[in-house]
Amino acid sequence: MNRYGLTQLEKLAIAVAVVAVLAIVIPLYRQLVDIKRTADCLSNLKDIATAINLYQLDYNNTLPLAYYANPDGSPQTDSAGRPLTWVVCISSYMKRDLQRALKCPADPTEGSTVITDPRDNTKTLTLSYGFYAALSAARVEDLSNPGLSVLIADSLAGGQNGSLNPNPLIGGNDGFALTFDDGLLKPNVNSKYIVRLAVWKRREDRGWEPDNLRSFHGKGVNVLHADGHVSTRAPSIMFLQRDAQGKLEPPWTLPEPRKADE
């Protein structure tokens, strides 16, 4: 007598095999997607670096402003009430489409900071990258180690602790100004970590812990350094480290103006 179809045991074996294959294929696919998105993000940062370099040639080797500020430190805004950011400084030097270069493909919010397009004020742009506010308009030669100093990084508006006073930017769109946990543009002895950096999810049942951090990319945070090169750094760069003299150690730094005779 001929038997048609599969036995229950054969069906079970096939199901187990399919599950096993999927268990291998799905993580591999996700890894490949992450590799592609990370590469595209680093390409964006390289384009931004090129534009900043051209800007520096015209402005005596000075870095762009993190944002245009009023005397009280609050952001200047355009006619639409949106903050004027570092993108305004470099937009004319960018060769690529601005929106494509300013949005990380792995950003789960597709760009949480909204600004007016400097090339067309009838349009808006969304940003996935934050400018380290302490280096706003700084001279590269005033940095002790620009090759290790973070200038721009994956960032979200709000970040780990949300928008901070005393000078939150308009509508919480502060993702482009990477500042310190005390809400100041410069660190004091109590500053412990950078805020508004590549954080889009945290566990609410715990306080501040390193493993609360969730970067856009599997291997960490994509950054543009002050000397123009790009890399992927571990999320632990959120924490401030100091040397024996109390000065910030890389990847975070502050300008130290040279003496007139140097």
Image (cartoon, rainbow, N blue to C red):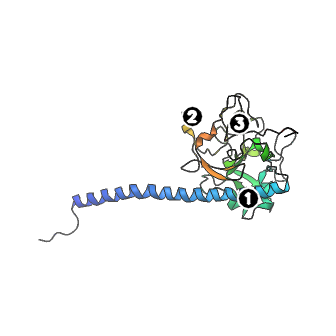
- Labels 1, 2: front one: 1
In the picture, the quarter occupied by the C terminus is top right
Q: Amino acid at mark 1?
A: Thr
Residue 166 seen in render: yes
Badge 1 density bin: few <14, some 14–19, many ≥20, Cα 10 Å: some
Question: Total number of numbered labels?
Answer: 3
Neighbours of disc 2 within 10 Å: few (<14), some (14-19), many (20+): few
First reached walking from the N terminus: tag 3 or tag 2: 3
Question: Could you say which is closer to the camera, residue 144 or residue 240?
Answer: 144
- Most extreme residue toward the front, as rendered? 261
3D distance between C-alphas at marks 1 and 2:
35 Å
* Closest to the observer, 61 or 132: 61
Q: Which residue is mark 3?
A: 180
Q: Is 224 displayed left or right of 234 in the figure?
A: right
How far apart, in angstroms, are the residues tagged by discs 3 and 1? 27 Å
Q: Tell me residue 158's x, y (percent).
A: 68, 42
> Is residue 66 at all visible to an observer of this figure?
no
| Tag 1 residue | 50
